[in-house]
Structures are given as C-alpha cells and as structure tokens.
Image (cartoon, rainbow, N blue to C red):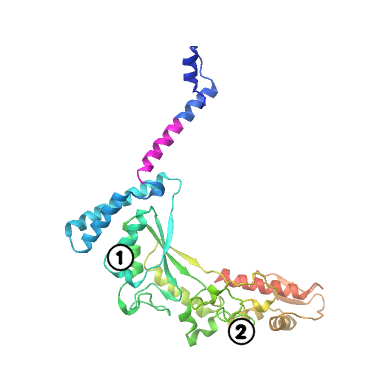
Amino acid sequence: MFPLPFWERARVSGKATGISIRQFFEVIVVWFMFAWLLGMAVSAQEFPYCAFDRDSIAQKSELLQRATKGDRAAQLQYQAVLTDHNDRLKRCRESSWLKTQALWIRLYPCDLKPGNLDQILDNVVNFGYNQLYVNAFYDGRVLLPHQDNPTVFPSVVGEQAPQADLLAEVIQKGKERGIKVYAWVFAMNFGPSYSKRPDRQGAIARNGFGETNLQDPKAIPEEAGVSHIFIDPYNPRAQNDLKNVLFAISQRQPDGILLDYIRYPHRTQRITHDVRDLMVYGYISARKLMSRALSPLGQSLIYDYLKDGRVQREVPIGTKLWQLPDGKTVIANGTDLNQALWHLVTEHARSGVTTF
C-alpha cells in the first residue's frame, strides 16, 4: 500500500500536526498527479498518439464519398469536419510529449482519381500524423506535371494527365488538414533514366575499374538494381540538374525539402583498402583530384596511385606534394606516401559529397 498523506495520518492518529517541508511537498506532488491524470483523460479522447476514434473516421469517410459524387451538403459538412479535425489534432499535439509524428509516402498516377488523395491525407490525420514527407524526386522521376517539367527527368504522372500537379495538390490539401508537407528528394541517386542519356554519361560516378554502381560486382544488390544510379558530385551538369529539380519543387512551396542519398553507393564489402574501389573516378572528379597537386611530382604520384592502387617511390623530404580540400598543404616528410595518398583521396571523396 502507498503511505497515507500527512492529513490522513493526522486524522487517523487524532493528533494535530503542523505542516513540515516534507508535508508541503507531498501536497504539491498530489496536485501534480491530479493535473497529470486530468490531462491524460483529456488526451485519451483522441486515443493514443492523437489518433481519432472509429466513429469520427467513419463519418469523415462517408462524407468524402458523398462529396466526391457531387453532394453539395456533404461537401460543406466534409469541409467542416476537416477544420474540426485540424483543430483537434493541433491541440492534441500541443498537449502531447510527442510534438511531431511523421511518415513518408509516394504518390502515383492512380492517386489522381477523385477522392483518392483526400482519402490518403485523411488517413494520415486519422492516425495522428502531423507531418508528411512526400517523395518528390526518386528513381529518376520527378513529381511534376508532364507539361510543366523543366528538368531532365520524366514525370511520375507522365502523359496520363499531362497538366496534373500532384505535388502542388498534396501540399495544398495537406495544409488544409494541418499537416506540414515536406518534399523528400534523392540527392546523389538520379535513377535509371539518367544513366540512359548519352549526354550524361560523364556525370555518373565510377570506380577505378570504370564501373558505375550498376556494374560493380561488389555493390549491394538493392543498389545495383535499375532504380539506382549514383552521380559524380563534382560534375557541374549533375549539380545543375539537381538544382533545377529543387527550384521547380520549391515553387510549389512545401514546408521544407529533405535531401536523401547524400552519399556514395553501399557495397557488400564494408571496408576496403584499395583506392580503386572508391567512386571518385568520374571525369570531373578525377580532374579535380589531379588538380590538387602542387608540383609535377605530386601530380605523378596521384596519377600512379589512382592507376595502380599503390606507389613505390623515394621523394625528397620537403617537397610540396598536394593540397587537401581543407586547404592544408602536404609536404613530403619521409612517412608512408600510400597512407598520405589514401588520406587525400578519401578527403576528396568526402568533400565532394558535403559540398554537392
């Protein structure tokens, strides 16, 4: 059993008692517990994680079906329910310890059917989510209208509905429901359509054997599939192609843009000591790496290291060799050149990703 509060102990004992500091804090604790339980009772009206009850969900779904068929009265009632659920979700999230609950989705041409997108977003609210990450650029396709697509990537919707703007629509409908909608974008993974363009072959990342991630025998099967193709982050064409995607998406005014795949492809071999396994042999990347040399000897060492994976030379101490991406000059000091070259190449690879 829990110990009796001080006022109960005094009543049972029949003795008067003063309020000590400890007793004062007992009163405070009891009142906090009462307030907490009251808050839990209020929150419980929305069910765990701010999800809505079955009756509310069923009512909204039934109104949507009628509204989609042109029932004017149902359309007005449906809008009123959306406003009410928006307010209830906001209040629940503000009072909950979990302020944000999010999920990501992909949209498809079938979501253009009347009522489909509304039902998807209603389900998001029904389960208490208040943020949505919409895949706006993935697998080499962009969620833009076919007739308003300034990028080199094909539209997800295609010619089925050439003027349909699913991204703009989901952002607008999401905000009506109190959902923050973010555009989720693949950054260095440009997808299969990109690899098929003759004018973009130089923008694709390659290893020291001339292989893309599609051809690398040590690539993880998932990333060796046709839906993934990684680009050379140093290539200005690839940079501009992504900028065009981001600019077009930003015009739809999402709440933010999330960048994914800011990395090189994964491989089954988690650790490598062979520089030729690294995806830094794209045309622009290799040129940039060679340009880091501060002397003809430094350039020759970088070239041989990239070609053979190892160098065996005697270099006069004090010779300026190359400059690291952070601006530090490397000077020959008698230490292992292969280790210094490995550091140069891995820093070059890292810098390419972080500055992309």
Local secondary structure at mark 1 = helix
- Toward which corner of the image does residue 254 lie, by quadrant? bottom left
Helix, strand or loop for the magenta stretch, by majority: helix
Which of these two is toward me, 159 or 267? 267
Residue 39 lies in magenta, yes or no?
yes
Which of these two is toward me, 193 or 339? 193
Q: Residue furthest top?
A: 15
Q: Quadrant of the C terminus?
A: bottom right
Residue 240 picture location, percent across and down: 48, 77
Instruction: Give the labeled residue for mark 1.
Output: 116
- Residue at 27%, 64% in the rendered image: 115
Q: Specify whether 131 is left or right of 207.
A: left
Q: Is residue 352 above or below residue 4?
A: below
Three-letter residue code for mark 2: Gly
Residue 154 picture location, percent across and down: 40, 79
Find the magenta span and give its range. 31-46
Instruction: Give the labeled residue for mark 2.
Output: 210
Alpha carbon of mark 2 to alpha carbon of mark 1: how far? 46 Å
- Residue at 43%, 54% in the rendered image: 101
Residue 135 picture location, percent across and down: 42, 67
Q: Could you say which disc has been placed on residue 201 in the image? A: none
Three-letter residue code for mark 1: Asn
